[in-house]
Image (cartoon, rainbow, N blue to C red):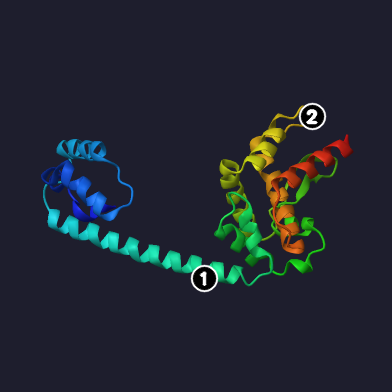
Amino acid sequence: MQVLRNYPTPDKIVTAGAEKIEGTWKSTMKRTAGIKRAQELVKVAGTSIGRKTGLVAAEASLQNLLSEYDLYSQQYQQLEQLMLELLQQVPHAEKLLDIKGVGLITAATFVGEVGDIERFQDPRQIQKLAGLNLVENSSGKHKGKSKISRRGRRRLRHGLFMAMITILATNSEFRHLHKKNITRETNPLNKMQSIIALCGKLIRVFYALLRTGRDYSAEKMLGDIEQGMKAAA
């Protein structure tokens, strides 16, 4: 971003040179890419096949885009701050953020779509609200496979699904459950089925935190699952 703001064309990058570019980075950033990255940038810019005419208009257009980016970034930060303030007004809602991989948008989406958690007596009601409950695709004598109903709040369902993708990339306990789902000897799930199942698990965890106000515990969650599997056996 600093290169685009200060040296918006390949010619200006080459003219500035690696040391000046690195100096710009050091004056505006806490961590810089270093002289080697600056030298690589200058080398590549020297062989650029970019446009050679109309550069004044191109630079003006680029600066307008950067100004728009700054405006949208500022508005996004303001919106995040507003979401946080509203989330803090909901009892125990901040505890959702203690789960690694769960961000402000996920927590705010869940609380906003579900509303007062006290109106639900069981987390399966929220699962149905999200359209993540299983239904059997059958007619007459034909008995088809079970699939999620998709009847419910699409924003809630989409938010949970996208949250689980992030959670599986950063959260060791949910990644452990995912691995068990797809590698278990009896009735293993494919990856998509496992993600849907874990969305249901996330709903149950959210429900428990909001209803009880307890702190999230990865050990307790995994322990409860292990006990459930032993009981089923």
- Residue 183 horizontal/vertical position (percent): 70, 29
- Residue 127 horizontal/vertical position (percent): 73, 55
| Label located before the other in sequence (1 or 2) | 1
Q: Nearer the viewer, residue 143 or 61?
A: 61
Residue highlighted by disc 2: 186
- Residue 34 horizontal/vertical position (percent): 27, 41
- Residue 113 horizontal/vertical position (percent): 65, 65
Q: Secondary structure at mark 2?
A: loop
**Residue furthest out toward the top:** 185
Q: Amino acid at mark 2?
A: Thr
- Classify mark 1: residues with Cα within 10 Å, few (<14), some (14-19) or many (20+): few
Q: Amino acid at mark 1?
A: Leu
| Circle on res. 232 | none
| Circle on res. 82 | 1
Q: Nearer the viewer, mark 1 or mark 2?
A: 1
Q: Nearer the viewer, residue 190 or 222?
A: 222
Q: Nearer the viewer, residue 37 or 106?
A: 37
Classify residue 222 by image quadrant.
Answer: top right
- Classify mark 2: residues with Cα within 10 Å, few (<14), some (14-19) or many (20+): few
